Amino acid sequence: MPGLRRVALIGALLAVLAACTGTPTTSTTTATEPSTDAPPVERVYVSLGDSYATGYRPAGAAAGTGRDGFAYLVAERSDLRLINLACSGATSAQLRAEPGCAPGNRGPDAPDPAGRTQLDAAVQALREHQGRIGLVTVVIGGNDLAPCVQAQDALACASQAVAAVRTNLAATLPALREAAGDAPIVGLTYPDVFLGAWVSPAFPNGQDLARLSVFLFRDFFNAALKSEYEKVGAEFVDVTATTGGYGPLTEITQDPAYGSIPTPVAKVCALTYFCDHTDVHPTPAGHEAIASAVLASR
């Protein structure tokens, strides 16, 4: 009897061990059971700003859909649904205070602002999608600064423009942060398009303007933008730096269209339409560069 009891105990122990090893069984019931996993939650990306964000292309540029604009590229590559509220031509004051945006000034598939400012529309979208915000980007200020290119005193004009941009961002960014919660906000600047004045016949003093633009972007405009974005815990992407705008103008490149020119000038000629069309907007390669910079910041 003790021997039989021992055999029974060993048999029971082996049965328990077999169960613990996860040995497959012949049952197929688990394969046919419906999945209880919830579908993935859709995350959204809210874009504000000017024509850089809408993906605008100037007349004479290669045809395109606008969906190669940086905001569309970032949304696609981040698996985010884009809500693009940007309006071509917008200044920093218009972004926060001017309602509406004409259909021709919006990006592809952009929602109708329905008489709201960009800021109001963004705050509403952020609150409606609370907890599902994957990204917010803001690119603004270029249209504030643009008139200074032709000003008699470019530095004084730029000083006033930058002060206005700071004032408007100081009123805009805290509202975005409050509505976005902990979601990432990324502020952008621009390529130094005015480097292209080096080769443009539209600017008789083009080389002087190009040299001055390096200071204006690096130490003045971009420094001011960075300060305002950092106040609300936003990431600042220095697109001027990532597109080579701070490189030495003494470094020479052989450009197929313009011959021997400074390397930073050649880069801005490739990434924007400024050299060919005196237009500040990015080429498809420029939008690629901006999208890559945004994605690298996340």
Image (cartoon, grey):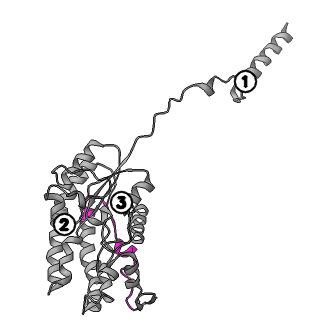
Residue 188 tag number: none
Residue 267 locus on image (x, y percent): 40, 80
Question: Which residue does the image show at 25% across and 68% down from the upper left?
Answer: 227
N-term mark: 2 or 3: 3
Q: Tag 2: residue type?
A: Thr
Label annotation for residue 71:
3
Give the structural element (helix, strand or loop) at label 1: loop
Q: Residues within 10 Å of mark 1 (few under 14, many from 20)?
A: few
Q: Which residue is mark 1?
A: 26
Q: Answer with left or right where residue 195 lies relative to residue 178.
A: right
Q: Residues within 10 Å of mark 3 (few under 14, many from 20)?
A: many
Amino acid marked by disc 3: Ala
Q: Looking at the rendered structure, which numbered label has been put on residue 91?
A: 2
Segment tinted magenta in the rendering: 228-250
Q: CA distance from mark 2 to mark 3?
A: 18 Å
Name which quarter of the figure residue 22 lies in: top right
Q: Of the residues tagged 2 and 1, which is closer to the observer?
A: 2
Task: Kindly tell me whether residue 298 is visible in this rendering.
Answer: no
Q: Nearer the viewer, residue 98 or 235?
A: 98
